[in-house]
Amino acid sequence: MRYWGFLFSKLLAVAGAFYCIWLGLNLCLPEPTSFSDFRLARFAQDLPWTFAIMVFWLAALGAVALVAQDQRYRCRTCLRKLRMPVGGGAWDKIFRLGAPQVEWICPFGHGTLKVFELHFTGRLSDDWREHDADIWRELELLDLKK
Ligand SMILES: [Zn+2]
């Protein structure tokens, strides 16, 4: 819930920023000229407005993409940026080592995100696995096997 709330708040901040930019465009750019009783539209009939709307649209899409990319690599529990990317698998040894993937871990041990780099049948979604609350248990189990 906290994870999605953070995403929603970032999207809301981006929307607010771009709304302010839109208001600034309305203040700075003049209205399109009109011929007798025919009024030109802003988009596709007035070059400055068309160019401004195109740049505005591209910047808004870029901002949303940055928000989505930032959110993808955040811990689902504490919202910190995931760290320590570790590559796994290999392209040339795919049958022996598995498909190429990158694992990111939360610096406080809340979980691991596995990002697949190979997508045979459509895009594979990222695999988030939460760790147990007791981070030492896994290490203790490894000692018992020896
Ligand atoms: Zn975390």
Image: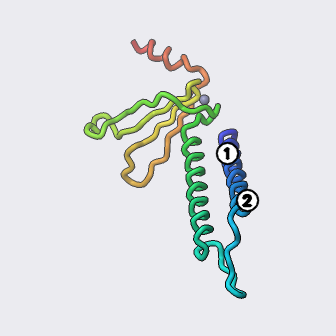
123 vs 26, left or right, is: left
**Residue 145 in picture, x, y percent from top left:** 41, 15
Label 2 beta carbon within 8 A of ligand 1: no
12 vs 129, left or right, is: right
Vertical placement of residue 60 versus 96, above or below: below
Q: Quadrant of residue 44?
A: bottom right
Question: Tag 2: Cα neighbours inside 10 Å, few (<14), some, or many (≥20)?
Answer: few
* Quadrant of the image containing the C terminus: top left
What amino acid is at disc 1? Answer: Lys
The residue to which callout 1 is attached is 10
Q: Residue at x 37, y 46 (%)?
A: 118
| In front of the other: 109 or 6 | 6
**Residue 116 in picture, x, y percent from top left:** 42, 42
Question: Tag 1: Cα neighbours inside 10 Å, few (<14), some, or many (≥20)?
Answer: some
Vertical placement of residue 37 versus 56, above or below: below
Q: Residue at x 61, y 73 (%)?
A: 46
Of mark 2 and mark 1, the one earlier in the sequence is 1
Q: Residue furthest bottom?
A: 36
The residue to which callout 2 is attached is 23
Vertical placement of residue 24 versus 127, above or below: below
What amino acid is at disc 2? Answer: Leu
**Residue 82 in picture, x, y percent from top left:** 54, 32
| In front of the other: 28 or 115 | 28
**Front of the two marks 2 and 1:** 2
Vertical placement of residue 40 versus 25, above or below: below
Q: Quadrant of residue 33?
A: bottom right
23 vs 145, left or right, is: right
| In front of the other: 97 or 75 | 75
